[in-house]
Structures are given as C-alpha cells and as structure tokens.
Amino acid sequence: MSLADTLNSNIQRLKDNAYPGRGIVLGLTEDAENLVQVYWIMGRSENSRNRIFENEGDFVRTTPFDQSKLIDPSLIIYYPVKSEASYHVLSNGDHTDIILDYLKNGKSFEAAVSNTYFEPDHPNYTPRISGIINLKDKKSSYKLAIVKSVYNDPQYCERQFFIYEKCIPGVGHCIHTYEGDGSPLPSFKGEPFITPLFNNIEEIAEFYWDNLNSINKVSLMVKFITAETLDTKIHIINKNG
C-alpha cells in the first residue's frame, strides 16, 4: 500500500471510530516549514461536553463553557498544551505540568511519564497520552507516550514510548485514548498511526474536525512551531460558542 493510500485508510479509520476519545497528532507540514501539534477532546456526558479550549498566550487550557453546569472539574479541566524554552508539551491531563516540571529540572520525558498512571475513572481507566517536541533534541523530532491499564484491569499498568527520529513532510503520527466506543471503554491498541498534515493551520484544524464523530467531538486545537524562527501559532475550534 502506498503512503497516500495508507494515510487515506487511516483517516477513514479515525472517521469510522465513534469514540476515539482524546487524541494527539505530531508531525511536520508538507513544506517542512512548521512542526505541528494537534489535540482534540470528545465527550459523552454533559459534564465532558460542557467544555471549550481557551488560548492563554502559548498555552491552551480547557474551561467550562457554562460554569453553572459544571459538575466535577477533576480530569476534565487542565492545560493540554504548554511550552517553555525548547520544550513543547501536550497531554490529555494534568501530567502536562508534571512533564514540563521534569524537563525544567533536567530530567527526561520518559522519566516524567514513568511517574504517571492511567486515570482513576473506573471502569474505563482512561489512558494518559502525551507528546513532546524538544527543539534541542538532536536524536528525535518528537516523542509520544501512552500509559494504560491492561484490559481495564487497574492491577496492571503498561507504559509505551514511541520515538520518531526524523519527520516526514506532510505526515503526522496519531494516538488517542480509546480503541472505540464500549462499556467499559477499550484502551487504544498498537502503535500510533500516520495521518496527513498540510501547510495551512486552518486547513489542518478543519480536516481533523470534520473527521471526528459529529455527536461526540467537543474541541480541537492545532499549534504550529516554525522551524526556522521558532515562532508559534495556535488555532482553536470549539463546538460550543
């Protein structure tokens, strides 16, 4: 199967998934000018759907759309996107801060992820997913990680790391929390899969937004890091508002 066919097949896989949950894509634009981070959230409950992304400078945080309807902020209100110096971190929870703190103290991404666990949301035990672009790391363009239970059994924790040494122009690697809908929700299986990226930030945002389940999608953001100038740009789509 050609690269183009694989990319198309994988996007169809994402589109057909009613509930991939929260997702991350890391990669490079077709013209190789911008490193790319994509992050989205989905929700089935009213509490999970009552959220939007807000841009705070170079950070992105989740916040309630309607404060009066907020039931439980734990696990749903956090900073998915933060950066400092050469580190550009994103995750599906408060471990964004854990990872960034480790890095600022001279420790590794792997060490930080090894100090986190899946979420305590019985019976799903939602995986913790994370990614990093470290502009000073000469051994990798980006890294992804997932921390999950084994077949929804909280006795067993599995951590997987994926290191990509060189970006492929126009290609990203995608990982998300759930294999699909279910009760309990089954954790993501296998390794991150490749998906397409484009030169325009709005085009990327609209493309992934259009390929997420229309009922369950909540918010999506795309971040560009310009390889030459290190300037950043963020584009957000919220279902609410």
Image: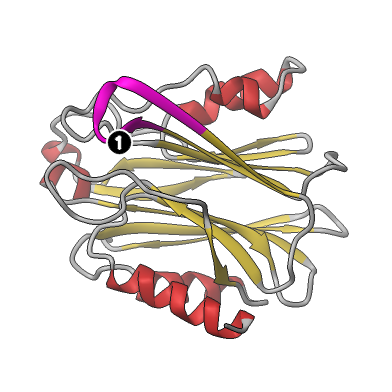
Side of 153 relative to 143 (left or right): left
152 magenta-colored: yes
Name the residue type under label 1.
Thr
Quadrant position of residue 147: top left
43 to 15, vertically: above or below: above
Q: Secondary structure at mark 1?
A: loop
Residue drawn at point x = 54 percent, y = 72 percent: 204
* Rendered location of residue 127, percent (x, y): 37, 36
Depth order, front residue of 27/156? 156
* Rendered location of residue 66, percent (x, y): 19, 45
Q: Is residue 206 visible?
A: no
The residue wearing badge 1 is 126
Q: Is residue 78 visible?
A: yes
Residue drawn at point x = 33 percent, y = 68 percent: 212
Residue drawn at point x = 20 percent, y = 38 percent: 67
Depth order, front residue of 58/44? 44
Quadrant position of residue 2: bottom right
Side of 90 relative to 76 (left or right): right
Quadrant (top left/top right/bottom left/bottom right) for the C terminus: bottom left
Q: Which residues are magenta?
A: 148-159
* Rendered location of residue 98, percent (x, y): 54, 21
Quadrant (top left/top right/bottom left/bottom right) for the N terminus: bottom right
